[in-house]
Structures are given as C-alpha cells and as structure tokens.
Image: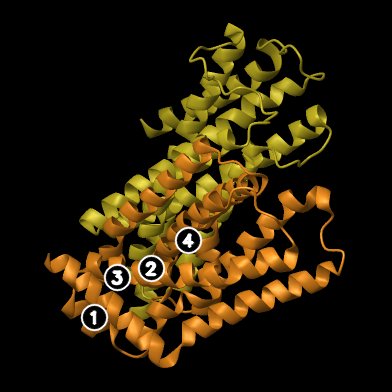
Amino acid sequence: MKTLLRWSLWLWISLCICGAFLYAPLAEGFVGQSSRILFFHVPMAWGAFVAFITAGVYAILYLKRRRPEDDRRSEAAVQIGLLFCVLATITGALWARVMWGAYWNWDPRQASIVIVLVFYAAYLVLRDAVEDPETEARLASVYAVLGLIVAPFFFFVLPRIVQFTLHPDSVINDRGSVDMESRMLQVLLAGAIGFTALFFWILRLQTRLAALEGRRRHRGLLS
Amino acid sequence: MIWLRQALAVLAKDWRTELRTRHALHTIALFAVTTLVTVSLALGPAGVSSAERTTTLPVILWIILLFAAAAGLPRSFVAEEEGHTADALRLSALPSAIFAGKAAFSIGLLWGLELLLTPLFLAMMDLPVGAPAALVLILLLGALGLAVASVLVAAMVAQARSRGALFPVLAFPLLLPLLMMAVELTRGAVVGGLDLNVLQQLVLYDASLTVGGLMLFPVIWNP
C-alpha cells in the first residue's frame, strides 16, 4: 500500500512537471517562457503555507497533550516549510529578474516572504538555544503558535498596505473569480495537490528520522 | 477583581524595583539618546535632504525605538530568573496577571522613552510634523505592541541559554509587521494625514498580540 502511494506520488509529480512544460499554454503578457515557473513557484509557496499551518496545529496539539511526537512533527514541518519557502523565494526572484528586471525590489510579496523566512529561522535558533528538551519543545511550540497568530498579517495584510505591488493576482483574486486559462489552472492545481502530498510524505520521513535520532541519543546517554 | 489587584501589584513591584536601581530606565534612555546623537552626527550638519526627509526620518525614529526596547526590556524577566525571584512570583500571582502587570510596566517605560526621545528627535532632525495628534496616537499604539511582544519574548528568552543575543532574533520577526505599519503611519502623520486603513491594521495587530500573549504566557511561564 505504501509503495503504491509512493509510486503514485512520483507519477503525479512527474505528470505535473511534464504538464508544466508541454501541456499548459503560455500566459499572455509574460516575457518568453517565463510563465512556466509559475507552476513550481505557486505550489511551493502553497506548500510552505500548508507546512507552517501544520507546524502551528501540531504545536497546539503538543501544548494540549504534551506528547513528544507532536513536537517532533511540528519541528519537522517547520524545517520542510522553510525549504519550500526558500525555493519559492528563489523561483520568485528568478522570475522577477526576467519580468521586472531585478532579482529583488522589495515588492510587498517579497517583503512578507522574507519576514516569514526570518520568523521560522528564528524558531530553529530558539530550539538550539534551549537545553532542556521539555522546555525546548514547550517554548518552540509557543513560538509556532505565535506564528499562526501573526501569519495572516504576513500573507494577507502587509501586501495590501503597500499598494503598488507588481505581483500578479493570486489564483483567486480580489474579485473572487478565477481568471486563468483552464489548462493552466489544471496544471497549477495538480501541482498544488502534488506538493501538498510531497510535504506530508517528507514530514513522515523527517518525523521518523527525528524519533530514531532521539532514541539513539537517549540510549547513548544511558550506556 | 483578584486578577486586577494582582496585575497592579506586579506593576507596582516592577516600578519600585526599577526606581531603586534605575537599570532599565537608564539603559533605555541613554541608548536611545546615544543612538540619536550618532545618527544625527553621521548625517552631518546638512542632515537628510528635504525631499527625502519625510520618507527617511520616520524609519530612523522607529529603528531607534525598536533597538532601545530590545536593549532594555528583556531585563524584566532575566532579572527575575537571576535573582531567583521567579518562583516566588509564580506562587504569588496568576500567570495572566503577571503578564498584564509586566506588559503595563513595559508600556509605561516605552511611553516615557517616547516622551523623551520624540521631541529631541524632531528638534535635532528638524522635522516639522503636520499632524501632531496623529503622531502621538501612533506612538502610543506602536509602543503598546512593542511592549506586549517584548514581554512575551523576554519570558521565553529568560529560560534559554544565550539570553543576550536571542532576544532580537526572536522579537524582530514578530515586530517587523508592526514596524512597517508604524513607519507607514508616521510618514503620513509627518505630512499631515492619518491612513485609517493602516491604523486599523495596527490596532488589530496590537490586539492579536495581546490576546495571544494572554493565552500563551501561562504556557511559557509555568514549566
């Protein structure tokens, strides 16, 4: 069953990649082939969003039930989310170079993603700075929940404050409608689903790894 | 009622110990004034050109406030841990009352700082303010969020190992949205207007930090 799921994930992601390059048409108003990076950039940003929400949910669960595995899941989700976030930033910067002429120009979207990056990097620094494992898990969970509280401001409010964004409309725009060619939308949504599944798969692996490492450290202390 | 009395007692206790040593007061005030002198001196007699004055100077004002807060506010909890008074405090008051008392103390400290720094800043930088009442409101609201977030992070940092460096690392990502909103509003106030939209966001951010703090502080405080 697991093998089947793994292979179907592989197949799904491969189809998304092929679809991005072969099936989806080019978007109007974009330089050359540059709109194709959208099929990776948007799912990655989405994946990061899902990851940080997951981290916050597991942090709440940890604070409620105090089970170490919830904290391990929360930490793993932040690590993977940071990876997705960095990739989304890089793909965004590459695209900005092509379209706007510069890798970085502090567009509101770029500003908010940098704040998110710094916030969750600080989360990992906090974990390193605390020695007692129980305190570490407790404080880190609090910080992740704080992230959940302020995240809406990063993602939705800040980009609205500064009015002059160059960033293209989100998939669902202010008018609440979807303005996108249907084949592009198919690939985009398939990518988002694929990256979400990919996230949860890596999360499982990372959590197992963390559990094994924890057990080994524990045994090392005893012997 | 008991809650309010406890919060007021914590506030009174903090003020009394502060007035005995004047540690935070002196640190914050001197830090802010020294930084202001440094900035003013580095800009030279010409200062900032009049065209860029309204966009640049509000940033400098808020950066000074942010760093002064980071220099002085973490003391309040580190001192409790180092003086071994934290456990006595844990026994004698409700966690959320402690949070409220400490936050009120920090807010008072920051408001005092602003009272000292802002007139000096405006005079030294030769910055006329179009809407003084709006500027006062923004300073009060900005300090509120700054203090609440600082108390939360200070309580976390007090339980970690590398206390000095950790505070800015954890607090700044949390405060960046606040800083951006405050700067944006201050720019408006200098020119003579008040963007109600951004003001609303600032109030909302303050409120989410306060509510989040009241909910999360007991978890940070009680091991």
* View extreme (left): residue: B1
Dot 1 corresponds to which residue? B89
Disc 3 vs disc 1: which is toward the camera?
3
Residue B218 to residue A69: above or below: below
Percent position of residue A60, x then y: 30, 51
Disc 4 vs disc 2: which is toward the camera?
4
Q: CA distance from mark 4 to mark 2?
A: 29 Å
Percent position of residue B7, x then y: 23, 70
Q: Is residue B222 left or right of residue A157?
A: left
Dot 3 corresponds to which residue? B101
Identify which amino acid the numbered label 4 is placed on.
Ala
Subunit that carries the residue with mark 2: A
Q: Are marks 3 and 1 on the same chain?
A: yes
For the colour orange, the matching chain is B
Dot 2 corresponds to which residue? A136
Q: Earlier in the sequence, mark 3 or mark 1?
A: 1
Q: Is residue A191 left or right of residue B217?
A: right
Q: Are marks 2 and 3 on the same chain?
A: no
Identify which amino acid the numbered label 3 is placed on.
Gly
Give the numbered dot on residue B189.
none
Residue B49 to residue B81: above or below: above
Dot 4 corresponds to which residue? B143
Q: CA distance from mark 3 to mark 4?
A: 15 Å
Residue at 30% x, 63% y is: B217
> Does the rendering let one see residue A208?
no
Q: CA distance from mark 1 to mark 4?
A: 25 Å
Q: Are marks 4 and 2 on the same chain?
A: no
Subunit that carries the residue with mark 1: B
Disc 1 vs disc 4: which is toward the camera?
4
Chain A drawn in what color? yellow
Tell me the element at label 2. helix
